Amino acid sequence: MSNNTPFVQIDLTPEYNMNYHERITIKPGMRSGKPCIRGMRITVYDVLSYLASGMTYQEILDDFPYLTQEDILACLSYAADRERQILLIQA
């Protein structure tokens, strides 16, 4: 990246970010230490994969009745927090 190339800086930090810390748990002996929902064996990755495959919130909740909409939002918030960064785009 040369210093004379113009870039636009975009801050991707959300103004509102759900507090997921009580819903997303990490335990070394559970699911290889991957982030799970409320200490259960379903991971953030599982939920994000279902959403990415096209499942709706309601379909996920129907398939996993022990989950809540807040659990799904916590997964999204957790993922957004992990990916939060400053992005440079060439103008």
Image (cartoon, helix red, strand yellow):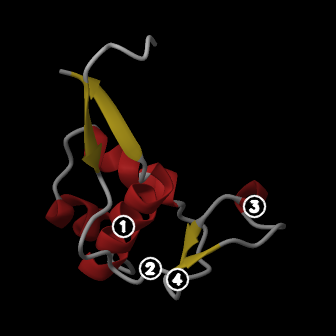
Q: Which mark is residue 77?
A: 1
Choose mark 1 or mark 3, whichever is in front.
Answer: 1
- Residue highlighted by disc 3: 33
Q: Secondary structure at mark 2?
A: loop
Which residue corresponds to mark 2? 20
Comparing labels 3 and 4, the label whose residue is closer to the camera: 4
Q: Looking at the figure, which quarter contains the C terminus?
A: top left
Q: Are marks 2 and 3 in contact (CB under 8 Å)?
A: no
Query: How far is the residue under mark 1 from the one under mark 2?
Result: 7 Å
Q: Is there a contact, CB below 8 Å, between mark 2 and mark 4?
A: yes
Q: CA distance from mark 2 to mark 3?
A: 17 Å
Q: Are marks 1 and 2 in contact (CB under 8 Å)?
A: yes
Between discs 3 and 4, the one toward the N terminus: 4
Distance from label 2 to label 4 (Cα)?
4 Å
Looking at the image, which residue sits at the far right? 29
First in sequence: mark 2 vs mark 3: 2
Q: Earlier in the sequence, mark 1 or mark 3?
A: 3
